[in-house]
Amino acid sequence: MGENLILWGNTGLGTSGQIYDSTGAFAATYSCIQDGFEGVGNIQSNPTFVVGPEGNFYLSQIAAGQSQQSPCVDAGDPASPMVIGTTRTDGVQDAGVIDMGYHYPLFTGTSPVTVTLTPYGTPIIIPSTGGSFSYNIAIANSGSSPATVDVWCDITLPNGHQTGPTLGPVNLTLPAGFSLNRDRTQNIPRSAPSGNYTYNGYVGLYPGTIYDQDSFPFSKFSTGDGPAIDNWDNSGESFADWMTPIATAVPESYTLGQNHPNPFNPITTINFGLPEDGWVRLRVYDLLGREVAVLVNAYRPAGTHETTFDASHLPSGMYFYRLQANGHGEAKKLILLK
């Protein structure tokens, strides 16, 4: 007897609605089964997996930042006791009715790595035209052995939603007993709504495992003047001296990745690959062919590159982004959903 299972994309499920294990057919309830299977609470619907921490597969969930809700969420046996574990990419404990599928262990230990955010010039008030603030981010490893971790920041908006990451994730290797700190500057665009914000810093394994976090508040007013800011750029002192070395391969051909997330609101990431050095143009167009943004217009070396698109100033809808480099052209569509 099995329950709260997902059997999808497997082989050897049998025929005529039967499922077999090593001892023969067995009954299943409150499970998601490809091709269907009679039983209480069973469903036949794509479980909608997404890749999360360490490359594992989780259930797509709006609460965890995905744009779709898996039909397996809260679809398990209502009488089943809740297990300690998560089906979410953000590592949050499953709650309510148990989800179908495997629950990954939660991070329950303690880590010697900590993060501390120290804002400069408090209280931080951003005028209606946008602005910026500076802060210090300090990461410390108090353990007796080196630690490899991700460091990133994001922003909690006045409506409670989060946007980012605005910094990172940066993968760092910290020696035992070592600490570092970097001064950074964060832009807030004029398109950002007025209200109270929280700036968050994390250390852990991006995005779902958080070892430590810190935050500070800031506000954006609906009044005030200053130079107009139109981006969420984060700049400042580099982490390069402690970044974990990564072996990078030069692509064999030109590639343009699908933006992620997609649909998005209001920031998304686009990757592209170049087999040779050259001048790169990456632009965004609306459905009428009008240029609405220039993301890259510069010389880039061979390799894999990443850029972000902030569509805060644009209405919801479908857009196209086009890569041009060394005579190569390629385009894909993206969806802004506010």
Image: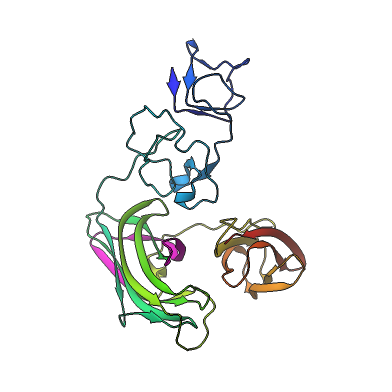
Residue 86, how many percent across, how many down? 39, 41
Residue 107 appears in the picture as rendered:
yes
Residue placed most toward the observer, 117 or 190 = 190
Above or below, 69 against 129 in this view is above
Residue at the extreme bottom of the image, as rendered? 226
Question: x%, y% of residue 193?
Answer: 48, 73
Classify the position of the C terminus by image quarter.
Answer: bottom right
Residue 143 placed where, x, y %?
A: 23, 56
State the image coordinates of residue 155 (x, y, percent, origin top left). 41, 66
Main SS of the magenta part reads strand
In percent of the image, x 44 and y 37: which residue is there? 74
Using the image, determine if residue 211 lies above or below residue 26. Answer: below
When asked about the image quadrant of residue 313, the answer is bottom right
Q: Residue at x 47, y 82 (%)?
A: 128
Q: Quadrant of the N terminus?
A: top left
32 magenta-colored: no
Q: Which residues are magenta?
A: 157-181
Identity of the residue furthest to the front in this view? 222
Tell me: residue 46, above or below residue 138. Answer: above
Residue at image position (63%, 56%) is 258
Q: Is residue 145 left or right of residue 244?
A: left
Q: Residue at x 46, y 80 (%)?
A: 222
Residue 184 in sight here? no
Q: Would residue 17 be found to the left or right of residue 160 on screen?
A: right
Asked whether, in this view, residue 312 is left or right of residue 219, the answer is right
Color theme of the render: rainbow
How many discs appear?
A: 0
Residue 159 lies in what quarter of the image? bottom left
